Image (cartoon, helix red, strand yellow):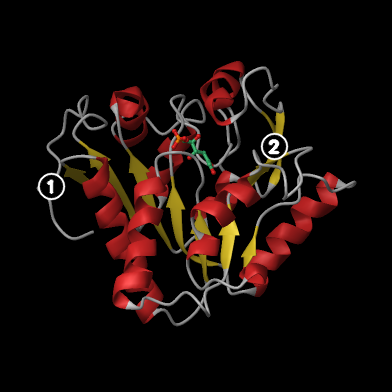
């Protein structure tokens, strides 16, 4: 893993956007994997600026989301499908049918998981995957204990993750307990991975993921076995690292 420590979330966003913009301009095949949640927002904001100011075009790019809540439709304001449309896809020139997420409303969720894997494979696989990390070390919604070999599947969220994500739901609403998520096996098949983490609440998960033992108790530690993973951190998220990180440089 390549660890890069930057000043603050805006610098992490700019560095993440640089790496994605370079891939978009130079890509030859494969798709872009998108994360939702709060941490990647500065990345998307920087990409939207590059689209408007520098003409960066996403017109031919195919994108796949990591996960979706079971029971939320793509129109639901709390769904990740809607989140990514409103915060990124609709603000650039991404055709609507180029952004796919798991269907949390599918009657047969196992069939949906299989067809999601097929759809990813049909585009040539994920060339570049953007990831966040949960405070308990989850990636996608692979909670502690998830198998490192798993494909897209239905996962039960921990109480901690549901509590952490309550901030994205209106007060009084119940956070769904189940999600469809790309598995860690799916994530590890991405040819390049960019994990972003910012803020003190992520410091412990980060140090366990990058310096701790590789263990299913810390799903993000699976990335230690991936050949091309870059971890972009701000100073707060890097605060517990013991090994010296590289100085700021282009990821
Ligand atoms: C979201 C996702 C999750 C988040 C993680 C961190 O698609 O897969 O793994 O990246 O829960 O979320 P934030 O950035 O909101 O702290």
Residue 2 visible? The answer is: no
Local SS, label 2 = strand
Q: Nearer the viewer, residue 3 or 227?
A: 3
Q: Quadrant of residue 46?
A: bottom left
Q: Is residue 126 above or below residue 67?
A: below
Residue 172 spot, x, y in % from top left: 67, 17
The disc label shown at residue 246, or none: 1
Q: Residue furthest right?
A: 107
Q: Secondary structure at mark 1?
A: loop
At 41% from the left and 79% from the top, the residue drawn is 27
* Callout in the foreground (2, 1): 2
Are discs 2 and 1 less than 8 Å apart at CB?
A: no
Q: Is residue 65 left or right of residue 172?
A: left
Q: Quadrant of residue 157?
A: top right
Report which residue position mark 2 lands on. 179
Return the x and y of residue 87 as percentages of the image width and height. Answer: 50, 52
Confirm or reject: label 2 Cβ below 8 Å from ligand 1.
Answer: no
Of callouts 2 and 1, which one flags the residue occurring earlier in the amino acid sequence? 2
The 10 Å Cα crowd at callout 2, few under 14, some 14 to 19, many 20 or more, is many
Q: Is residue 87 visible?
A: yes
Against 85, residue 119 (above or below) is: below
Q: Say left or right for 185 vs 136.
A: right
Query: How many numbered discs sit on the rendered protein?
Result: 2
* Residue labelled 1 has its Cβ within 8 Å of some atom of ligand 1: no
Residue closest to the far left:
247
Classify 127 as above or below 67.
Answer: below
* Relative vertical location of residue 49 with respect to residue 151 in this rendering, above or below: below
Residue nearest the observer in this picture, 69 or 193:
69
Cα–Cα span, label 2 and label 1: 36 Å
Q: Residues within 10 Å of mark 1 (few under 14, many from 20)?
A: few
Which residue shows up at 45% across the image and 82% down it?
28
Q: Position of residue 220 (x, y in %)?
A: 44, 37
């Amino acid at each position: 893993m390549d660890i890069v420590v930057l000043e603050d979330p805006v610098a992490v966003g700019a560095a993440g956007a640089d790496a994605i913009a370079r891939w978009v301009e130079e890509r030859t095949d494969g798709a872009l994997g998108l994360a939702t949640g709060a941490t990647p927002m500065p990345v998307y904001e920087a990409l939207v600026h590059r689209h408007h100011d520098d003409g960066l075009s996403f017109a031919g790019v195919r994108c796949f989301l990591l996960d979706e809540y079971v029971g939320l439709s793509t129109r639901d304001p709390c769904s990740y499908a809607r989140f990514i449309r409103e915060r990124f896809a609709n603000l650039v020139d991404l055709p609507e049918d180029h952004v796919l997420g798991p269907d949390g409303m599918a009657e047969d969720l196992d069939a949906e998981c299989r067809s999601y894997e097929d759809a990813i494979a049909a585009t040539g696989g994920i060339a570049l995957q953007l990831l966040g990390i949960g405070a308990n070390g989850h990636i996608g919604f692979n909670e502690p204990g998830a198998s490192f070999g798993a494909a897209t599947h239905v996962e039960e969220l921990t109480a901690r993750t549901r509590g952490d994500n309550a901030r994205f739901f209106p007060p009084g609403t119940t956070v769904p307990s189940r999600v469809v998520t790309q598995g860690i096996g799916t994530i590890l098949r991405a040819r390049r991975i960019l994990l972003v983490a910012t803020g003190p609440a992520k410091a412990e998960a980060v140090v366990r993921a990058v310096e701790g033992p590789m263990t299913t108790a810390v799903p993000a530690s699976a990335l230690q076995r991936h050949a091309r993973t870059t971890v972009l951190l701000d100073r707060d998220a890097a605060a517990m690292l013991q090994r010296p990180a590289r100085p700021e440089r282009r990821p």
